[in-house]
Amino acid sequence: MSRPVKERALPFTRESHKHLFTETIFLLGNGKSRENYNLESLRKHGTIIGCNALYRDFAPDILVAIDAKMINEIDNAGYNDDHLVVVPANRNAGRRNLYRWRVDGFNTSGCFSMKLISQLMKPKKCYMLGMD
């Protein structure tokens, strides 16, 4: 059985996901600086983009992963069945319900996320937490 893939030049648009295009975006990593912070309190202030294994503790509005092992874990957990997950277009092979985005010049999920934020979402403010 073939798994559906959502490959687009842009992973999502302002029209298809209007609620994600907020004036403020929070980019969350897995570093210690986020450990004692109530991440849920950020929801009322803007869109939350999380990287990699953040989904194990907290469900961001968008999860981003670039590492093949992490993408495989997310897929095996079924997280991408009910949540928006964005991955590089060349790292999707055979996985389901992932939004693929073609972009160059990244080497970490944080960098990939910042490109997504700056090139697609264009908020007025962006805060980073846990990127240590």
Image (cartoon, grey):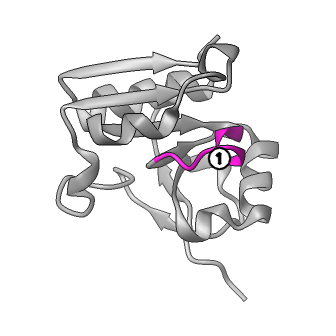
Give residue 38's position: percent from left, percent from top: 52, 31
In magenta, the rendered stretch is 53-60
Please give left or right for residue 78 compared with residue 14 in the image: right
Give residue 6's position: percent from left, percent from top: 47, 66
Residue at left offset 39%, top offset 58%? 8
Residue at left offset 18%, top offset 32%? 23
Please give left or right for residue 46 compared with residue 60 in the image: left
Can residue 66 be seen from the camera position used here?
no
Disc 1, SS: helix
Residue 59 belongs to magenta span: yes
Quadrant position of the C terminus in the picture: top right
Please identify the quarter of the rendering in which residue 15 is found. bottom left
Can residue 52 be seen from the camera position used here?
yes
Quadrant position of the N terminus in the picture: bottom right
Mark 1, other Cα within 10 Å: few <14 / some 14–19 / many ≥20: some
Give residue 68's position: percent from left, percent from top: 77, 44
Residue 28 belongs to magenta span: no
Q: Is residue 113 above or below residue 4?
A: above
Tell me the kind of residue under disc 1: Tyr
- Disc 1 marks which residue? 55
Residue at left offset 42%, top offset 24%? 114
